[in-house]
Image (cartoon, rainbow, N blue to C red):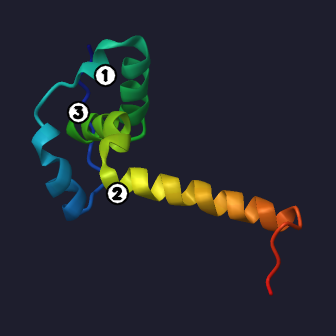
Amino acid sequence: MKNFQHSSMGGFSEFDEGVGQFAATELPITETEKGQAQLDFLLEQGFDWDEALKLLHLHEHIYENAEVRQRMAEDCRMLFVKWLYEQGELHED
């Protein structure tokens, strides 16, 4: 497995605090061919090793977050309402 060291593109403190626990760990996603390709891509884009691992971990576990699941459900409902409006089933009155 490659361990490139690239300069950081900067970050947000709340991002770093929220996922700092993953900074020094090697995540299982890098053990797959797809995971390695994603990691290589992020490194080529200028992310450093720890940042790339954090992003991959977040990508893998994003739907475990209750707030994200709630927003996804609300988005689906809004898309359905928009579709109903476009079909003429709902009106603005």
Which quadrant of the structure image shows residue 27?
top left
Distance from disc 1 to disc 3, alpha carbons, whole Å, reads 19 Å
- Observer-side mark, 1 or 3, equals 1
Q: Nearer the viewer, mark 2 or mark 3?
A: 2
| Location of residue 23 by image quarter | top left
Secondary structure, mark 2, is: helix
| Left or right, residue 79 beside residue 33 | right
Rendered residue at 26%/13% (across/down): 1
Q: Is residue 71 above or below residue 49?
A: below
Residue toward you, 63 or 43? 63
Q: Does the rendering let one see residue 72?
A: yes
Residue 5 % position (x, y): 23, 33
Amino acid residing under circle 3: Gln
2 or 3: tag closer to the N-terminus: 3
Circle 1 sits in a helix, a strand or a loop, which is it?
Answer: helix
Residue denoted by label 3:
5
Can you give x and y, in whole percent of width and height, for residue 8 in the image?
A: 26, 48
**Where is 40 relative to 59, above or below?**
above
Q: Earlier in the sequence, mark 1 or mark 3?
A: 3
Whole-percent x and y of residue 18?
18, 54
Type of the residue with mark 2: Glu
Residue position for label 2: 67
Q: Position of residue 49 (x, y in %)?
A: 24, 34
**Disc 2 + disc 1, Cβ < 8 Å:** no
The residue at the point 28 percent across, 57 percent down is 10
Q: Quadrant of the C terminus?
A: bottom right
Real-space Cα separation, disc 2 to disc 1, in angstroms: 23 Å
